[in-house]
C-alpha cells in the first residue's frame, strides 16, 4: 500500500486554493443571506464607557418591547463597572408580583404582557439576548441604520436590510426620518432632522450594538482574558519541551 504524502511546499496550486477559500469565507461575513452588503462595526468589549452608553440607550428605547431574559442586571456591576446603586436607580424600572421593585439579581424582563404586544405589533417582539450571536454585530448595526420613510407600511417606515419588518423606528428622534431619492434605495435625504448628526447617531448605534454583543455572551470577556494566559503558557511549555527533547536526543544519531 502506497503512503499518501501531503506537502504544501512546492504546491502553489494548493496554496492558491487555500488563499482564495480564506478570502471567500472572509468576504461572506460582510454579506447578509440575501446578498445585501453589511456595514462594518467596531466592537470593543473592553470599552466600558461604550457598553454603559449602549445599556442606557437599550433600557430607554428598546427594553419596553424587547426583553433580555437570559441576562441579569447584576452582571453589569463587574463587566460594565456600574455601581449597584446606579443600576437600581437608573436601569431597573419594573416590579415583581408583590409590587416591590425588581431585585438586581433578577432576569431582565419587562412589564409588557405578551397579549398587549401582539395586539400592538401583530407579533410578539423577540427577546434580544442572543441577537448579536445569531445575526452578527454587522447585521444588527446595518439594520438599525437602514430605516427609511415608507407611508405604505403600518408604522410609516421600512428597512432596506429587512424589508417590510413589522417594527417602528423607535430611534427616529435620534437619527431623524429619511426617505430614498432613487429607486434602488441607496441614497437618502432627511425630511425630519433628529437630535443627532449622522456621525453621532452611528456612534450611538455602535455603542448599542457593542452592548448587545456583550449581552449575547458575557463570558467572552473572561474567556479572552484567560485565553491570553493559556496561549502564553502553551508557548512557554512548547519552548521548554523543545529544549527537553533536544537534551534527550542529543546523543542519538
Image (spheres, rainbow, N blue to C red):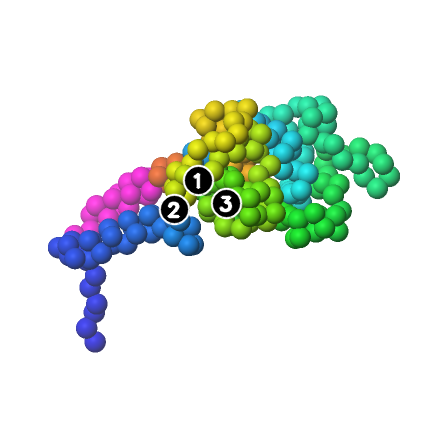
Residue at 60% in and 44% down:
155
> What is the crowding at mark 1: few (fewer than 14 residues within 10 Å), some, or many (at least 20)?
some
Segment colored magenta: 238-253
- N-terminal-most mark, 3 or 1: 3
Q: In front: mark 3 or mark 1?
A: 1
Q: SS of the residue at dot 1?
A: strand
Residue at 20% in and 57% down:
14
Residue 45 located left or right of residue 91:
left
Q: Label 3 to label 1, Cα distance in Å? A: 11 Å
> What is the crowding at mark 2: few (fewer than 14 residues within 10 Å), some, or many (at least 20)?
few
Residue 83, can we see it?
A: yes
Measured from the top left, where is residue 236 in percent x and y? 36, 37
Residue assigned mark 2 = 184
Residue 75 located left or right of residue 144:
right
On whether residue 245 falls in the magenta region, the answer is yes
Q: Label 1 to label 2, Cα distance in Å? A: 8 Å
On whether residue 92 falls in the magenta region, the answer is no
Residue 115 located left or right of residue 61:
right
The circle on residue 159 is: 3
Question: If the image is split into quadrants, where does the N terminus sit?
Answer: bottom left
Measured from the top left, where is residue 206 in percent x and y? 48, 32
Residue 2 located left or right of residue 56:
left
Q: Label 3 to label 2, Cα distance in Å? A: 13 Å
Residue assigned mark 1 = 180
- N-terminal-most mark, 3 or 2: 3
Contact between marks 1 and 2 (CB within 8 A): the answer is yes
Residue 45, can we see it?
A: no
The one of 136 and 189 positioned closer to us in this rendering: 189
Amino acid at each position: 500500500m502506497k503512503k499518501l504524502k501531503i506537502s504544501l511546499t512546492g504546491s502553489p496550486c494548493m496554496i492558491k486554493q487555500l488563499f482564495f477559500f480564506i478570502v471567500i469565507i472572509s468576504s461572506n461575513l460582510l454579506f447578509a443571506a440575501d446578498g445585501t452588503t453589511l456595514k462594518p462595526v467596531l466592537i470593543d468589549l473592553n470599552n466600558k464607557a461604550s457598553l454603559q452608553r449602549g445599556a442606557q440607550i437599550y433600557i430607554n428605547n428598546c427594553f419596553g418591547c424587547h426583553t433580555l431574559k437570559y441576562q441579569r442586571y447584576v452582571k453589569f456591576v463587574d463587566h460594565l463597572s456600574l455601581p449597584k446603586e446606579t443600576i437600581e436607580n437608573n436601569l431597573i424600572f419594573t416590579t415583581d408580583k408583590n409590587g416591590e421593585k425588581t431585585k438586581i439579581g433578577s432576569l431582565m424582563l419587562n412589564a409588557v404582557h405578551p397579549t398587549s404586544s401582539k395586539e400592538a405589533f401583530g407579533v410578539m417582539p423577540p427577546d434580544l439576548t442572543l441577537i448579536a450571536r445569531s445575526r452578527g454585530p454587522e447585521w444588527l448595526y446595518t439594520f438599525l441604520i437602514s430605516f427609511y420613510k415608507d407611508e405604505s407600511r403600518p408604522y410609516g417606515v421600512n428597512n432596506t436590510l429587512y424589508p417590510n419588518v413589522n417594527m417602528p423606528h423607535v430611534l427616529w428622534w435620534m437619527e431623524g426620518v429619511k426617505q430614498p431619492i432613487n429607486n434602488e434605495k441607496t441614497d437618502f435625504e432627511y425630511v425630519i432632522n433628529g437630535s443627532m448628526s449622522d456621525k453621532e447617531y452611528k456612534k450611538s448605534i455602535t455603542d448599542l450594538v457593542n452592548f448587545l454583543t456583550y449581552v449575547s455572551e458575557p463570558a467572552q470577556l473572561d474567556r479572552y482574558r484567560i485565553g491570553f494566559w493559556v496561549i502564553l503558557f502553551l508557548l512557554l511549555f512548547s519552548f521548554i519541551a523543545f529544549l527537553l527533547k533536544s537534551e534527550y536526543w542529543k546523543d542519538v544519531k
